[in-house]
Image (cartoon, rainbow, N blue to C red):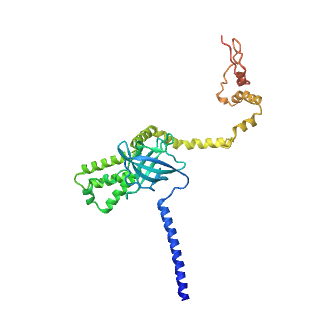
């Protein structure tokens, strides 16, 4: 009898431990699924014309980084129209401003979506609510595949997976998905008779996606135009780049060695060097007076005209020079004459 009670007690303890461990693991899984925001947050609201696929606890992201959470969605009536008012939070220091744009975007093709927060260079004043003119509604992915049922029937499962993966990459805003998407279009067009109809359908659907997601094509075109200016200018002087590559190191290496030999390096303090060389302003003036004599002593003898006769004199007398000019000419064989 005692043994049975002891065994029952051990089983009860084991069962309690198992329940505690299972509860802890369940709590960790729920926390990971909810992906909560750490730190202080602030509540905001925004109106959308369509939020299909968006649910409470969805992410609010800025440049792909989670900055908040969707806390609720309710239907309201405004001026006779039904709108969806989305409540969400933003972690500090992120705030909602008058020029902020909100868009419902796809997180994956299973239908999970998130709010994309776009803050322009000029954010404007801080606000607590955005109207529909600053929001982009949700897009129904079924529009993308509208009219493609005959095509999809002729494709293999692997080709369908490739097409949907490229479509998802393009919808998420990754530019790397554009080239594979075009390649998938080429494969699709080869599997149907009416190729023009397929291409037209896909282009129209992509245009709707671009409009619903606030496409940046105008900004891209402007960037390409601005980028073409320096490229075109560089193309006209390509030969100068070749010359710089050939002769630049040959010229700059001796110059660098010369500067290093005379003591000029990155750590040189010019002010300290001048203070040590010229203790006073008078000393600096005396040094400047010696410059003409020094330059005269550096003249190459072969370049001096030895056939010159006696020194020439001024017929109207020498000019009376200012003090600053006398400093530069002091000690040199230069005489400035008066005009006739």
Marks counted in the figure total 0
In the visual, does 297 lie left or right of 46? Answer: right
Quadrant in the rendering for residue 289: top right
Residue 292 appears in the picture as rendered: yes
Tell me residue 175's x, y (percent).
Answer: 41, 50
- Closest to the observer: 119 or 75? 75
Q: Nearer the viewer, residue 181 or 33?
A: 33
Q: Is residue 163 left or right of residue 131?
A: left
* Residue 175 visible somewhere in the drawing: no
Which of the two residues, 126 or 218, is positioned nearer the viewer here?
126
- Which residue is drawn at the image coordinates 48% and 48% (left, top)? 44
Task: Specify the quadrant that holds the N terminus.
Answer: bottom right
Describe residue 254's horizontal placement relative to residue 31 as left or right. Answer: right
**How far across and how far down the image is residue 112, in percent?**
40, 57
Q: Quadrant of the C terminus?
A: top right
**Which is nearer the eye, 303 or 118?**
118
The residue that appears at 65% across and 41% down in the rendered structure is: 259
């Amino acid at each position: 009898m005692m043994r049975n009670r002891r065994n029952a007690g051990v089983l009860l303890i084991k069962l309690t431990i198992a329940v505690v461990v299972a509860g802890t693991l369940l709590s960790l899984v729920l926390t990971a699924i909810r992906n909560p925001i750490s730190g202080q947050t602030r509540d905001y609201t925004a109106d959308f014309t369509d939020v299909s696929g968006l649910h409470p606890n969805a992410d609010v992201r800025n440049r792909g980084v989670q900055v908040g959470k969707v806390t609720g969605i309710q239907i309201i009536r405004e001026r006779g129209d039904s709108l969806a008012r989305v409540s969400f939070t933003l972690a500090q220091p992120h705030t909602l401003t008058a020029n902020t744009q909100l868009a419902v975007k796809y997180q994956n093709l299973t239908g999970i979506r998130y709010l994309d927060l776009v803050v322009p260079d000029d954010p404007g004043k801080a606000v607590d609510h955005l109207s529909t003119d600053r929001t982009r509604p949700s897009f129904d992915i079924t529009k993308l595949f509208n009219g493609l049922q005959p095509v999809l029937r002729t494709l293999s499962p692997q080709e369908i997976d490739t097409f949907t993966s490229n479509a998802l990459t393009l919808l998420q805003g990754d530019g790397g998905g554009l080239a594979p998407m075009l390649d998938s279009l080429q494969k699709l067009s080869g599997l149907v008779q009416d190729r023009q109809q397929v291409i037209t359908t896909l282009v129209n659907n992509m245009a709707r996606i671009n409009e619903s997601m606030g496409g940046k094509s105008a900004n891209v075109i402007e960037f390409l135009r601005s980028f073409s200016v320096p490229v075109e200018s560089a193309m006209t002087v390509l030969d100068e780049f070749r010359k710089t590559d050939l002769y630049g190191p040959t010229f700059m290496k001796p110059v660098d060695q010369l500067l290093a030999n005379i003591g000029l390096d990155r750590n040189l303090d010019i002010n300290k060097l001048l203070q040590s060389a010229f203790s006073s302003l008078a000393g600096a003036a005396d040094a400047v007076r010696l410059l003409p004599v020094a330059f005269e002593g550096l003249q190459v003898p072969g370049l001096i005209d030895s056939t010159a006769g006696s020194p020439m004199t001024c017929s109207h007398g020498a000019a009376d020079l200012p003090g600053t000019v006398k400093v530069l000419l002091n000690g040199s064989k230069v005489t400035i004459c008066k005009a006739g």
